[in-house]
Image: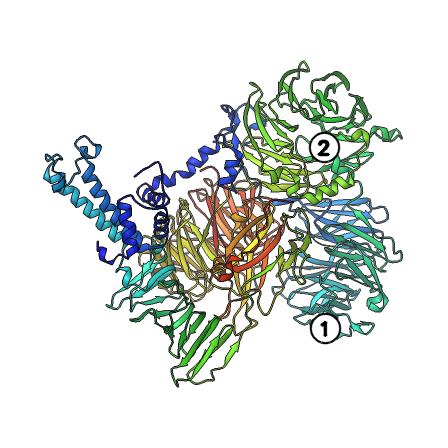
Amino acid sequence: MNMKQIRPWQSILFAAALASVFPSCIRSAPENVSTEAATPTKPSESIATDVGATPPIHPTNKIDRPESASVSGDPLPGNPELETVPLVIGSGNFNGHRDPVVIRFAGLRFLRVSPNGQYAATVRQVNRTGALLQVREISSGQVQHEYYEPSGMTAMEFDPTSQSIAYGAGDHSVVLQSLDGTPASRWPGHRLSIGDIAFSPDGKWLASFGHDNRLLVWDAAHATMAAEASDSTTRFALQVRFVTPERLWTRSPDGFVRWYDFTGDRLSLSQEVKLPDDFVVAATDGEKFYGMSPSRSLRILDAFTGRDLPVPQTDGVVTERILPRGVSAVSSRSRDLAIFTSGTQLSLWAGGDPRQSQSWELGASDVSLMDSDQDGRVWAAYSGSEGLLVFDRERPDSMRRIEPESRIVLDRIISPRFSPDGATVVSLHDANTVAVLEIATGLTRRQFSRPAAIAGAAPAIATVLLAGHQNEVFCGTGAGGVEILSDDSHASPLTVSVSNSAVTALATSSDGEYLVAGDASGSTAWVELRTSTRVKSMREQNAKITAADISPNRRLAATASEDRTVVLWNVATQSPTLTLRDFTHAVQALKFSPASDWLACGDEDGTVSVWSVESGQQVWSTTLRESISHPRASGAELLENLTATFKPEADARDSGNESKTGIVSIAFSRDQRVLAVGTASGYTQTIDLVHWTLLAPVFQQAPVSDLTFAADAASLLVATTSGDVARWWRAPDPPVSLAGHQGSVRFAVLDSSGQRGVTGGVDGQLIIWNVDQGTLVQSLGNEGEAITTGALAPDGRRAVSGSYGSGVVFWDLVEMKRISKRYGHKGRVWSFSFSPDGNLVASGCDDQTVKLWDFATQKILRTIDQGASVRFLRFSPDAKQIVTCTIDPRGWQFPAQMRLWETATGKLLVEYKGHQVAVNAAVFSADGHELTSCDADGRVCRWKVLTGNRIDQSVRPSGLSHAGLIRDGRCLVMRRFNNGLFIDTADSLARLSEVDVPTLAISDMNVASAGNRIIVGTEEGVAYVWSIGHE
Amino acid sequence: MNHSVWPEEWSTLLHAVAEESLTDEQERRLADLLRSNVAFRHEYILHCQLITLLTWQLTATPGDPASRIEILPETPPLLTGLSRHRSLRSRKLWIAGVLAMIVIGIVWLRPPRSESTSPGDITEIVGEVTVARADGSSIRLRAEELTQQPWMLQPDDQIETERDSWAKLLFRDKTAIHLFPNTRLSLGAEPSLKLTVPEGQVQARVTPQPSGESITFVSPHAEIRVLGTELEILSLAGRTDVAVSEGKVRVTRNSDGQTSEVATAQFLSITDSGDLAVLEWPQPADEWSVDFDAGLPVGWSGRASRDGLPNNSRGAAQSVLVSQERRLSMEIGSPTHPDGLFAWHDDSVLHITFRVQPPGWFHIYLYARPYADSQTSLTYCCVKPDLWQSLPGEWRTVSIPCSEFRRIGSGPTEPMLGRIPNRIVFSGPSDSAGFALDRISVNRTGSTTSANAPQTKSTSAR
């Protein structure tokens, strides 16, 4: 056989034979792939072999890693910058959940026009848990008041005098915020969040309707609760409205409108009105409901009777199919009805009569919020694409946009920059003012007037901004000056002249001693900040300086230029020491590493390179995929708009931030494990500096202007030229998918090593998986009965499962067989737990008992009465105790019990009091001394097991369930409703990571107790397994 | 090894292999057979083992590495020139070893009987399936047992699925039969002609039979004679339902011999005494496509987009935020077409050209209705998160067999025949940059129209 000419059939057979004889060859393939990733590869080869592969990586020299890059993650001795090294979650993917931080353009949750038509109030979510309330004067469009609510807002309303705003806070309080500057008044009273809020027409009373099904009426002047109504059933809150000061109604998802009489100190239910099941409410004026039938034609119902009212007709044509989007609003006094109809038009019916109709062209097809003043004169509409639009009914040409403001055009060019500590972001507010926004709240923390503006002159056009280390802001100008803006009231803003051409790049030393300024001609100027004087200027490069940085140890500075060079400077002497010339394109971004030993550079072609500053040698480089580094493949529309709106003045035409392609910003994580680069096309690409691999990119929808890692390295902050800032949470490396079920996977668990997975689904299959290989080992039938819950012994050899009934199914996963189905419970079994030795099984049931089973005999050893339906239970690590969580018969919204029991005797040991709703899960620490529990309202509590004392707690804005500990108990994993995972530090409950799981709903989540793996089962029938940290 | 049962072509090929005289055409054919024919693969391996054995015998010399390990068996007469000093013991051990390997190989390959008597194979299983043999023995098969090769059926076999298992049978003439849960199917002595379905549900795609022959399905209530068609049969205690999606069948009721013909897009429910009333069901075309070039079709969720279109495209659909059942998602979706979007055949393939921005993803949902109930909705879902994220920000065209869609959620409580997709929805996470679709199409790979595959747009951006 001529081995030089391998034929197809030979290769098939050879491959099959090789695979069967030497399976280890096949298994070692990933290692080979990994090795090849670190060897030079032609780009075309890489693309041809795997379109999904990452671009090639070119190590060009031996890599001497700094101590900080050690895989162990130990802190660097003697380097305070690097002493806080976080728990390693993965390679450095920052594609987890995205939290808006500063979002000027999109994401409005509430919109209200004040009754007098003076203000438009908007609420946005900030940093996931908080909310930013901004009150704009409609006439000027300027923000007059802004407030930050750390717990978020769930409802909002102006009072009838337009002097204050009431809102429902995320901590379940009612908050009355006066616009005159007096402190807010906070009224606790609800047990769950508030669904709606309403003032009485006279403004004396404020009604709050909560998801705890409590209707509270407050005396607004005296901040006291006047009356309360509740029928102790489980019901969510949709709407509450006062019709008169003595009469109000609530509306709930059950379709009932409940009318109450209010006498000043008493609320009494007067009648219940059932709305038709097929009626969708779009708006209400209190007395009528405007909404849609299934055919989307307009229906009007009497709120008092629930009966249909005649629908006005226009020219004999019934208003059919006019509510395609269901967005409408009614003015409270004039009863004018606005309906966002088809296309981009808004119809306004005076008094709700279509015969008195006006049409307004909004220019947006995605209007989602509308409101008006009480007379129906001033209207506001919010569109995701167009922003906040306002118009005056009396003036046909009055339609205008008040948010985002026109100054955004400037902001797009003068890129926002983070402060060195990542706590604030600096951007140009308008031509005369620089604003500093707080990352934590979104609030405007400071505003600086530019020196020329203070002097009454027109400021030179700003070209580049920089947040200094001493809380000052530097603003480069098109006239060659650097404006120094400081909080120091004794120092008036001043301008240092550094060049004859536009300043295009700025950097300061961390001790605040020097400022480096690059200009459009290639010159670099040094400014001594103590004296605010230019001490040196040299033209070392032949084209515009695009970026500058000073190393953290303050020994070196670097300037990048369009002439394809980077110059390293000695800070002490302000003289050039080395010129890096191996660039093929203009260098647009650079950054020193935290250990000051590397310099990362990015160019306009999308090539990122890392250089040793000591040797001047390139140690690594790669070129990003073209679709990521060049905007034409994505976001082209946005960038074209940007280009069209920006008409640079002559002196700013060569400013530093108008790059259209390639890498425009760079950041190192503080532990120097991850490098992030931002592109002009709106992508952020992270790079694992331990294994030198490209990680998952994320898309920002606008060119990236600056990047910074949060201090705890749990998130990456990304600023874009649109002025927005988003926080991307760290995520583990991509999961392994286990697909084999037909229908929802309701039970998903790993053995202690994480190598064996077991899943059960509504298809009645129990599937055993080899997680390492992602392959199905065995599929066992459950005699056609769905599997909805279960547990796996830590060694993975035994399992139990339950279904919708009372039976407990025992499985032998060594023999791979269903052993038996045992009965004993008298209701649905919701939860199981194995003792650590795998011999005992505890089951919790609707029959209000916990039963202990001997797995060997499948007999019940003990029954522990619980007094309520048991939804969760777990053995302690020594199996001597069991923690159980029950549910109130009225539903999860009501408090239930979480208790600790002695396994041997069934004796109640401890009750843990603190949760306001049902507890969904609890997990013991490895030593069994602490317990962490989470509930459906988002509360996490840490407890001392034997005393029941609460050690710590935190609240998340979404419900939680399914808790587990990984990484030697240091990380707490919880399921976020409906499709996310939180990974927290177990001891401080600080968020390390938040993952969005690709599913509509996670149906089960568990962890490998001794390993670092998480498994989730999903509604779509796929289970995912994540490996956390470097295994 | 019985060479007499080899088909002529196999014999030619295997002898050509032995003589290293394969022509290019023979090489191609050999590769095809090795890929597609389990029995041939088995014969090939045995043949190669024999060749190897002979080669070693012929070529090993005292100085060869092979001879140093002393594996040369008893020297045949023609090799008298070779060394005779090797111990008889080691030669016997070697022969025993080779024989053991062959036995192990045969056991591993596990051919129950020769292919000449086998009507076909069980090619896919979900869960466990029982095969009862005519001799009274029975075997329980699991999915993992088919990973190496299909299970060869024998005449008179009875295949039984359980409450949670499925099976696919592929006959020699390419007739494919899917057995749904709780189904029994008996092959009979003439398995290619008569198949009995005492209970359960089968879906069959019957290859056109030679003139004068036909396949007959026998249920407790009727005989269903087919000539080449695609049909479904639901055999329940009180009735048998028959639906034909392609071709025609003749139904003869057992109780009174009454007959009725059921043709394409017709449905018949047979009881022992009721009327044999054929019901028409709307059968959409096999092929369906939408390209968004003229904007978003009426009733679709999403918005028209012209942002960075692929070459040759004039428009795409961009996902929009939708609220449904208190859940927000980014969505592009068709309206509900009561008559169905396309005919869902065994070989239907969905093609999409899409772009998703990282870290976005989307699932594809097909909502379907049964033949006899225009309201009941069944939900099928396709999950491919890795695929959606493989080329961030770039247009990509993929083809997904409709058979990869998995049923999710609860459907009708009573078994019903039918799978008419009347709505398609692409749904992703609400807080992402969303995704865009440039083209969606469905066609059949096994049909005559498969050559007219949808125009795959270039993946390069314009």
Mark on residue A306?
A: 1
Q: Nearer the viewer, residue A257 or A637?
A: A637
Quarter of the image containing the N terminus of chain A?
Answer: top left
Q: Nearer the viewer, residue B275 or A309?
A: B275
Q: The numbered mark 1 sits on a residue in which chain?
A: A
Q: Nearer the viewer, mark 2 or mark 1?
A: 2
Q: Nearer the viewer, residue B213 or A867?
A: B213
Q: The numbered mark 2 sits on a residue in which chain?
A: A
Q: Which residue is mark 2?
A: A657
Asked if B224 appears above or below B139 in the picture, the reply is below
Secondary structure, mark 1, is: loop
Asked if B239 appears above or below A157 in the picture, the reply is below
Image location (x, y in percent) of residue A416? 72, 35
Dot 2 or dot 1, earlier in sequence: 1
Q: Residues within 10 Å of mark 2 (few under 14, many from 20)?
A: many
Instruction: Check whether the beta carbons of the residues at disc 2 and disc 1 lie within 8 A of each other.
Output: no
Image location (x, y in percent) of residue A631? 66, 40
Asked if A775 appears above or below B126 in the picture, the reply is above
Image location (x, y in percent) of residue A98? 62, 45
Q: How is the image coloured?
A: rainbow
Q: Amino acid at mark 1?
A: Gly
Mark on residue B162?
A: none
Image location (x, y in percent) of residue A225? 72, 58
- Both marks 2 and 1 on one chain: yes
Q: Residues within 10 Å of mark 1 (few under 14, many from 20)?
A: some
Q: Amino acid at mark 2?
A: Asn
* Alpha-carbon span between mark 2 and mark 1: 60 Å
Q: Quadrant of residue A212 in the image?
A: bottom right
